[in-house]
Amino acid sequence: MSTSVIEDPTLDAADRCDRCGAQAYVRVTLATGSELLFCAHHGKQHADKLKQVALQIHDESERLK
């Protein structure tokens, strides 16, 4: 019998921005399967470019409001 583990997609304090090291609120999954993490600031700053290359964008920046 095998058991599948479903990862919680929620970002937490251990997830850090790849750009500046602040807490990540945006996870970008690329077509290659690799992921990039961004704080709310850098996620917003690079949003246009990320939308062009991302397979999926998981944005939790609304948690800051």
Image (cartoon, rainbow, N blue to C red):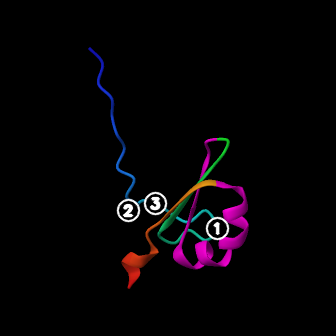
Q: Is residue 28 or residue 13 the one in the foreground? A: 28
Q: Where is residue 17 shown, x and y percent of the image? A: 56, 66
Amino acid type, callout 2: Asp
Q: Answer whether labels 3 and 2 touch (C-beta < 8 Å).
A: yes
Give the x, y percent position of residue 40: 53, 76
Q: Which residues are magenta?
A: 33-54
Amino acid type, callout 3: Asp
Kindly state the secondary structure of the residue where label 3 is placed. loop
Say how many tags the image has: 3
Q: Nearer the viewer, residue 64 or 50?
A: 50
Looking at the image, residue 56 lies above or below residue 45: above
Does 55 appear above or below 25? above
Q: CA distance from mark 3 to mark 1?
A: 12 Å
Q: Which residue is mark 3?
A: 15
The quadrant of the picture occupied by the C terminus is bottom left
Q: Nearer the viewer, residue 27 or 56?
A: 56
Structural crowding at the residue carrying mark 3, measured as other residues with C-alpha within 10 Å and reported as few (<14), some (14–19) or many (≥20): some
Q: Which mark is residue 12?
A: 2
